Image (cartoon, helix red, strand yellow):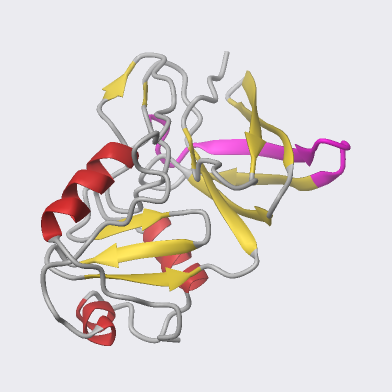
Amino acid sequence: MMTGMRRLPVLVALVVSLALVGCGASTPDAAPTSPAATTGAEPSSATDGDPGDVLADLGLAGLTGREIVDRLDASTDTRPLDLVASVREDEVLVGDGTSEVTVPLGDEFYMSVAPYVQTTHECFFHSLAGCQGELVDAPVEVRIVDADGAVLVEESTTTWTNGFVGFWLPRGIEGEIEVEHDGRRGSVPFSTTPGSPTCVTTLRLT
């Protein structure tokens, strides 16, 4: 479990990095932020705390990266949560404000989607602790297909307390996400290739 985790050197970098690539302020029709200065940039820690201690203190000890993402994204607690957690392409970064660890995500790519009607926000790497979408506890119909038209997801679900709903998808593909809610519908393209966002906040329902 601890293989692939690492401590990273300077707290200021942690805060700056997550501010740049996490969720921004809610605005009408916001576009996604491209992390020109942050793709590959590593948030950091100023302490020498043990990675296992960090996860244990946050109640996440013994969980895989996927289990951490699923638990935090679906949390019913009001955002922001009292921790730092950011979903990257192949790992989840988790911190307590002074120390941070990374946990690998495995073979699939995590994409969290926040459909909206009026208000959205800029986002690239999904913040499990801070991102807040417009539609909370909203029933939605979701269909995700790849570029060849193969159906990857087709289900009825409900957005979480943070206004998002997340999906584990194959890596290295492109396709389209379609969402329907309360008679409104919208769709956007997506990608799970290297450099792709894990946070989709551009899907407007009309």
Q: Is residue 161 above or below residue 72?
A: above
Task: Report the side of 180 relative to 22 (left or right).
Answer: right
Q: Residue at x 53, y 67 (%)?
A: 105
Which residue occupies the foreground of this view, 187 or 43?
A: 43
Task: Report the side of 37 relative to 194 (left or right).
Answer: left
Which residue occupies the foreground of this view, 117 or 126?
A: 126
Number of numbered callouts drawn: 0
Q: Residue at x 47, y 25 (%)?
A: 116
The stretch of residues the image draws in magenta is 134-151
- Percent across and percent down for residue 63 are 43, 80
Answer whether residue 148 is magenta in the image.
Answer: yes
- Percent across and percent down for residue 126 are 41, 46
Q: Is residue 38 above or below residue 65?
A: above
- Percent across and percent down for residue 45 are 18, 66
Q: Is residue 186 visible?
A: yes
Where the N terminus falls, by quadrant?
bottom left
Q: Residue at x 88, y 37 (%)?
A: 148
Q: Residue at x 11, y 68 (%)?
A: 46
